[in-house]
Image (cartoon, helix red, strand yellow):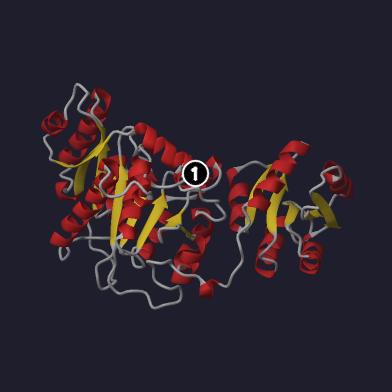
Amino acid sequence: MAEKIRVLIVDDSPETRENVRKLLQFERDVEVVAQAGDGDQAIEVAKQQQPDVILMDINMPGRDGISASQAITRAVPVAQIIIMSVQSEADYLRRAMLAGARDFLMKPFSADELMAAIRRVYDTRPTMMPMSSMAVGQAGTAAGAKSPVAQGNIIAVYSPKGGSGCTTLAINLAVALASKGHKTALIDASLQFGDVAVTLNMRPTTSIVDLIDRVNELDSDLVTSVMIEHDSGLRVLLAPPRPEMAELVTAEHIDALLKRIVQLFDYVIVDTQSALNDVTLDVLDVADRILLVTQQSLSSLTNTRRFFDLIDELNYDPSKMMLVVNRSSDKLGISVKDVGDALKRPVMVVVPSEELAVTNAADRGQPLASSSRGRRDPLVNAFFKLAETLEKELSKTEDDVIAVGNKNGSPSTKKKSFFARLFGR
């Protein structure tokens, strides 16, 4: 018989506890091991029973579900907590997630909704191991080791038009850099609908949300314990598992995270979304280079031209922009030369169109840069050429690069973002 999911039900209402138990009684892979009527009792029972999943009511007299969840997260880290509440406001969701909850159920819920949440958090539970033993990866710095004094480079992958292939470029660039021996991190900053986890076939046991309540106390142990290691040695910080959780992450959180993460890695690749919201603007602001992705289509060129017009008008430093033509083809009416001429910018790298190969790689969760196709393959070669171009560009201006903080670790003297002025942040 398959191992059962051991569940603890916590609610101050006996009737509610019984109703939840009845919803679970016919599930063959679930066993209700105990019940508790308040937060204090929940903590003691959790310590004794070591349940896999805890269904925790958020509003209880005495110690409430938030406080109890915080205590249980520390005392019984293997337990995955699902908060139950009649309140759906963002503040409740935020407090629940910061307390260590892995999911949130609105009362009343159906048996299907309940079981989907239980199986979801159970299937994505992390393998517990001491944080001091965590490592950045094959190409990374061991957790607990002294942080390097010099910091790396932040590379933002951005397109003003959605669907331009930024995620594919970001992933394969990051894998290419990691395979060349660089300590490399990949951050999914497309917070609502990030595709990095799916494209890399990763189980999102942790995400950026797990760091936001501790941005002022980030160390290498904490950061690397939340980042997930890919087979290539790449370390990945995933987007929130649910779209509504994106609003928990602010530009201030992103700024603090980048300041710390860039001190731990040679390259930090950030996959962004097209919307110029506060988070995306902050990433573009602190990036050492922006890979501006466009395609050989009129709509893509129009949006890219508008973006260039914006940064030209505001005297934005053009040296940090690197124009990349993605999904290039000689069969299209607009040539790569036409793209450069129309935008009056040099095209740094051209990535050929091979939709079937890209789609198959994403479906398999295997980046093309680490596939068996080899460096002679035009598409794979383009990703490595992009990595090499970045290496050369950044090495040329190493002494002049203005990053999140300067090389001796003191605060950056960088001017206020032009985007910030424009949007009145």
Amino acid type assigned to the residue bearing label 1 in the image: Val
Residue 197, image x and y in percent? 48, 47
Q: Is residue 421 visible?
A: no
Residue placed most toward the observer, 15 or 338: 338
Q: Secondary structure at mark 1?
A: helix
Side of 301 where 80 appears, left or right? right
The percent coordinates of residue 96 (x first, y second) are 63, 53
Query: Which residue is label 1 attached to?
Result: 198
Q: Residue reaching furthest bottom?
A: 146
The residue at 31%/64% (across/down) is: 181
Please tell me which residue lies in front, 156 or 280: 156
Please give the name of the residue rendered at 58% of the width and 50% of the height, measured from the top-left corner. 94
Looking at the image, residue 253 sits to the left or right of residue 283; the answer is right
Which quadrant would residue 111 be assigned to in this image?
top right
Q: Quadrant of residue 218?
A: bottom left
- x, y (%) of residue 295? 25, 31
Badge 1: few (under 14), some or many (20 or more) residues near its Cα, within 10 Å? some
Q: Is residue 392 above or below residue 149?
A: above
Can you give x and y, in whole percent of width and height, for residue 159 in the image?
30, 38
Would residue 64 be seen by someone viewing this image from the given angle?
A: yes
Q: Is residue 337 left or right of residue 226?
A: left
Tell me the quarter of the picture where residue 129 sits.
Answer: bottom right
Relative to 300, is 313 above or below?
Answer: below
- Give whichever of 247, 199 is nearer the camera: 199
